[in-house]
Image (cartoon, helix red, strand yellow):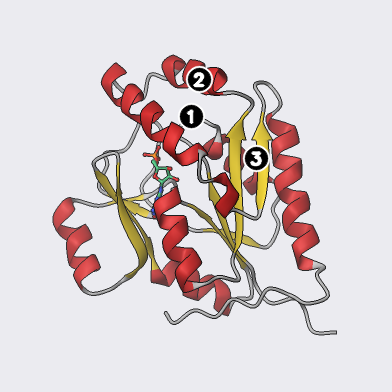
Amino acid sequence: MAPAPPLLVVISGPSGVGKDAAIAELKKLALPWHFAVTATTRPPRPGEQDGVDYRFLDADTFHKMRERDQFLECAEVYGRWYGVPRSQVREAFQAGKDVILKIDVQGAETVRQLAPEALFIFIVPASFAELAHRLGRRDTETPEEADMRLQVAREELSQVSRYDYRVVNREDCLQQAVEEIEAIIVAEKCRVVPRVVQLFY
Ligand code: 5GP
């Protein structure tokens, strides 16, 4: 039997829901998945590494790439630009690897238009109050930025019906969320009729 074709997996969820923590745990599983390194014009946070967490670009370089159509999708999120370099998806697909994209709901909508056969997973908090609490506790944003992210989160949470799967990341239950994401991807690889993603890079 031919191996299942590579999957394009989109993981979204509101800011503060724990997407980065979940992805860090998924990376440890050492499965043949490529975690796309997306580009951003936002400055690195303490501990973030260029080329690992993001490609940190100045606005000029980012927009030159945009003009050259080097992004599969790009969007302005919280006043900064983010984009998925086409090369990130192309090279992984050519190597037969599933690609995981951690992008916001606008980016997910663009990918849905380009590749309806992609797999869409949305991470939600157990409650809005829990999300507000987590965002308030982070020291990576100013109180104004945290407020803006919370307002956007309300809107984003209303988009969950556009996704194939919803995973709840409960406070102190990260491992369960990670296991659920792994289970979803593994099950999708066992489909009798696989998702075949056709992309024009
Ligand atoms: P953060 O600044 O907290 O790392 O990310 C802010 C938001 O941007 C998150 O929702 C993250 O998923 C999203 N994001 C990261 N990379 C991309 C991308 O390439 N495209 C889009 N549309 N969103 C992205």
Q: Is disc 1 surrounded by few (<14), some (14 to 19) or many (20+) residues within 10 Å?
A: many
Q: Quadrant of the C terminus?
A: bottom left
Residue under the point 56% across and 54% down: 162
Q: Is disc 2 surrounded by few (<14), some (14 to 19) or many (20+) residues within 10 Å?
A: some
Label pair 3/2, CB-CB below 8 angstroms:
no
| Tag 1: amino acid | Gly
| Tag 2: amino acid | Arg
Name the residue tied to disc 1.
16
**At which x and y percent is residue 154?**
45, 32
What element does badge 3 sit on? helix
**At which x and y percent is residue 192?**
83, 75
Name the residue tied to disc 2.
134
User: In whole angstroms, how far apart are the C-alphas of marks 3 and 2?
Assistant: 19 Å
| Tag 3: amino acid | Glu
Seen in the picture, residue 131 relative to 35 is either above or below; the reply is above
Label pair 1/2, CB-CB below 8 angstroms:
yes
Seen in the picture, residue 34 relative to 22 is either above or below; the reply is below
* Residue 68 left/right relative to 169: left
User: Residue 25, labelled with which disc?
Assistant: 3
Q: Mark 1 or mark 3: which comes first in sequence?
A: 1
> Is residue 26 in sight in this rendering?
yes
User: In whole angstroms, how far apart are the C-alphas of marks 1 and 2?
Assistant: 6 Å
Which picture quadrant has residue 142? Answer: top left
For the residue pair 37 and 143, the one nearer the viewer reads as 143
**Given this view, does label 1 or label 3 mark the residue nearer the observer?**
1
